[in-house]
Amino acid sequence: MSSTTLDPSRRGAHAGTGGAPAGGMSGTSTGPGPSFFRVLNSEFIKFRTLLSTLILLGCTVLVVVGFGALSAWGTGQFAEAAATDPQAAAAFAAQGGDLAVGVPTSGIAFAQLILGSLGVLLMSSEFTTGMARSTFAAVPKRIPAYAAKLLVVMVTAFVLTAASVYLAGLMALPILDNYNLNLDLASPQSVKMLLVNSLYVAAVAAIGMALGSLIRNSAGGIMSLVGLFFVAPIAFQLIPGDFFVEARKYLPGNTVEPMTAVQHVPDTLEAWQAAMVLGAWVVIPVVLAAVLLKKRDV
Amino acid sequence: MIEARGLTKVYGDKTAVAGVNFTVEAGRVTGFLGPNGAGKSTTMRMIMGLDRPTSGTVTVNGSPFARHAAPLRDVGALLDAKAVHTSRSAYNHLLAMAATHSIPKKRVHDVIEMTGLADVAKKKVGGFSLGMGQRLGIAAALLGDPQTVILDEPVNGLDPEGVVWVRNLVKYLASEGRTVFLSSHLMSEMAVTADHLIVIGRGRIIADAPIQDIITGKGQIRTRVRTDQPDRLMHLLAGDGVSVELQENELLEVTGLDPRRIARAALDSHVMIYELTPLQASLEEAYMELTKDEVEYHSLITTGAAAPVQSGGN
């Protein structure tokens, strides 16, 4: 039986009882409602049918791969200088060994900016375009739509970052090889760098989405994100006082280094502490945004 | 069936909807008439669970919209032309909406055909005219083949052919036994589309009656009567549903009784009357009174741009 036509013959039975009280018609649904899987499918359709989203994803790949290649070249130049210049040699001896392994993730700062902004836009554009009224009329419980959107953007950010970092590594290999530098993409440290950075970018995308949901304005959401990840670290460094030195460690953007360090660097968080801090930076805004989304008018 | 009980919405210090009660029955077109800013859209958003009532309740088929197991299959709404991401195509918009309820692609194509969007379905909604946006909104409302259809100002921006199309569509939907609730600020449009009319002004229900009663002014009939025995006539006319008001020395205003019966009562009791003037349906006057307060709107009327509003007027 087709429940999805406007065929008069099907509704014919109703026509006769048109004037009858509608009480008997309650629970008129004759088909499935919005399960989480269906809402997820809907959000994925919405995600992939916006050209601007696809452009931002393409930009992320280009930027991460491009910076990987540039960084490989720069590292090679550094190594070359170290061979002739004793000053450079001392500097290279101090940190050169770690440089190659950091090459594939050298574009992460930009990936987080792009995918974090994407997180903001996916949610804020719902409100700026009026789409939210359609979305939340279809899913009036609201939270499933929010959770589905969050899942789509976080999984995309993770997969795309991981793929881009790996691709950046592949691009960097021949360049580094040219300077006789070694990079093993399958080494535990390389894998750790790839996974932690990808998770980190997924976390930034989630924070972006929470900001977009809270602020409901694209420019405001992106500015808040930039403020948190780019302005605050610099401002905290410039403001004198022990408090800001300490507080700086707890900014979300400063949690990646402790998590990927080969050994603990003094005066930074332990890896597990950094993971907890980043987790809190994700969970608090995401939950706050969910609570307010449920409560506020659309 | 839609039922609102004590439905109230307050924004800051402004009361948009002030404790309204009404019932929208199935099987007929119920018009929701009121000037811009009267609270129509707010009421409709509250029905759809998008705005939370400050107090009171509104239910569709006995339960709040958000509690329905398959909301789109029960209630379809056009709340706003272009409640759509402007960079997405009409087809993809409908496809994403349909996916939430596993509505098949065929149905998406069907509503696109039905609303005449086939030629533009793959184009970005941002480039749509207001009329095309309305058609897309109506397509989205019909997507789940819902028992209840809510349309906020559906004819805004439509060309004359589109206006007739919406008129026929809503009548057809109602003839199938569906609940159809549509708003407009145009009395003339309501007169030809609705079976029943709920009139709202400043957040309050002014009238809730069959359209025929409202057009003929039944129950609202006012008649001006001049007589040299006002007290005697007042006594004669008194009865259920009739109110008689002494306005001047020998001038009465009678509400709820048609002129023929006033004349008959006067003749039977040998009371002389020397004026018997039927007055215009008070509802329309009240409605015009409401719209007159909106300065912008008023200036439109004086330039004649909104002439249809006055078509049934005085």
Image (cartoon, rainbow, N blue to C red):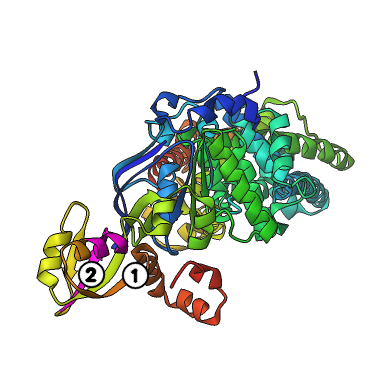
Q: Amino acid at mark 1?
A: Leu
Q: Secondary structure at mark 1?
A: strand
Q: B44 or B259, which is in the foreground?
A: B259
Q: Do we see residue A265 in this rendering?
A: no
Residue A164 in picture, x, y percent from top left: 75, 38
Residue A194 in picture, x, y percent from top left: 67, 33
Chain ID at mark 2:
B
**Numbered badge on residue B253:** 2
Q: B201 or B219, which is in the foreground?
A: B219
Quarter that holds the C terminus of chain B: bottom left
Residue B289, image quadrant: bottom left
Q: Residues within 10 Å of mark 2 (few under 14, many from 20)?
A: many
Placement of B245 over or under B257, stated as above or below: below
Relative to B265, B54 lies left or right: right
**Numbered badge on residue B21:** none
Give the mark nearest the N terminus, 2 or 1. 2
**Numbered badge on residue B279:** 1
Q: Which contiguous range is marked in magenta?
A: B250-264
Placement of A270 over or under B43, stated as above or below: above
Residue B2 in picture, x, y percent from top left: 40, 39
Placement of A10 over or under A154, stated as above or below: above
